[in-house]
Amino acid sequence: MTRPQPQADKTAQKLVAMGHEVIVEPMLSFQPLTVNGDVAGDAKAIAVTSAKAVEALVFNGLVDKLQHLPLYSVGEATAKAAEASGFQKIICADGDVDSLGRLIAERNQDGPVFYPAAVDRSGDLAGQLEQQGIACRMVEVYQMAAATGFSGKTRDLIEAGTLDCALFYSPRTIQIFLSISNLEKTTVFLNSMKALCVSKRVAEQARSFGEVFTAKTPSEDGLFELLSGSIS
C-alpha cells in the first residue's frame, strides 16, 4: 500500500477485511502550505483534484469563505472529503483530471475557477480550462514530500520475492517507488511482483514489474476489483 497517510491505513483496513495481508509503505507525505485568506479572489467556482486540496483549504481556514461556491470534484472520494469539510454544492467527475475539465466546460461554468493545487501535479487542469475559454486561478496550497527509502521490512520482502503486488494511485507515487528501488538496487526483484494501477497513465510507468494491471475505472473500487477479479 503506497498511498499517503491517513488514507493508507484506511485502505489497509479494507484490504485486511477482504482477507489480504498488507504492508503500508507511503511514498508521499502531505504538507499544507500557508496561503492568504483572499487567495480565491473573485472565483465563481472551485475545482479540486485531490482530497488533500480540501485538507489544505481546511488547514488555511478557508472553508467558511468558500463553501457557498460550487465545487467540482475529480471523483467520489474527493467529493466525500469536501462534503465532510462543509462544502455543499458538489459536482463530481469520473475520477481523473481530464473528466473534471470536461465536466466544468459542459456545465458552462463561468470563470474564474479557483484551483487549489499541489506543487507537483499530474495533468493540466488549468491549461484545459483555459483552452475552453474558462479563466482559472491556480494556487499551490500543498505539497507531497517524497519518501527517501523503503522500510527494512518492505525491502526484505521485495528481495525475497514474497510481495505479491503493489497498489499505485498516481504517476508520481510509482515514479518514487521505482526511484527508491533503483537506489536500493531492488529493481531486479520487481519482476516477481504485480503492479495494480489506478489508470493507464500510472500503468505506463510500471514496465519493471512482472505483470501490470489497470483498473477499469480510475478509483479505489477499480483497484479492488482487480484484487478480487482477474489477478486472484
Image (cartoon, grey):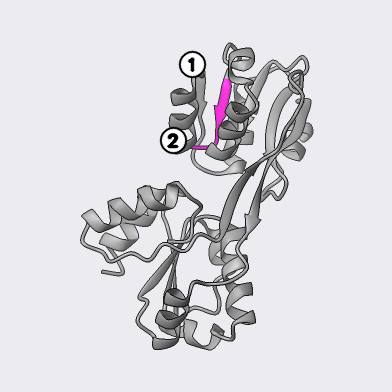
Numbered-mark total: 2
Answer whether labels 1 and 2 touch (C-beta < 8 Å). Answer: no
Query: Type of residue at label 1?
Result: Gln
- Compared with 184, 53 (above or below) is above
**Residue on which the image places disc 2:** 76
- Local packing at callout 1 (Cα closer than 10 Å; few below 14, some 14-19, many 20+) is some
Query: Residue 36 vs residue 203: left or right?
Result: right
Is 192 or 98 nearer to us in this picture? 192
Residue at the front extreme, as displayed: 152
Tell me the quadrant of the picture where the C terminus can be found. bottom left
- Measured in 3D between alpha carbons, the distance from the residue under mark 1 to the one under mark 2, in whole angstroms, is 14 Å
- Does 74 appear in magenta? yes
- Compared with 3, 113 (above or below) is above
**Which secondary structure, mark 2?**
helix
- Does 213 appear in magenta? no
Instruction: Read off the magenta span.
Output: 71-76
Q: Quadrant of residue 98?
A: top right
Circle number at residue 97: none
Query: Type of residue at label 2?
Result: Glu
**Residue on which the image places disc 1:** 88
The residue shown at (51%, 52%) is 4
Residue 72 percent across, percent down from the top left: 57, 27
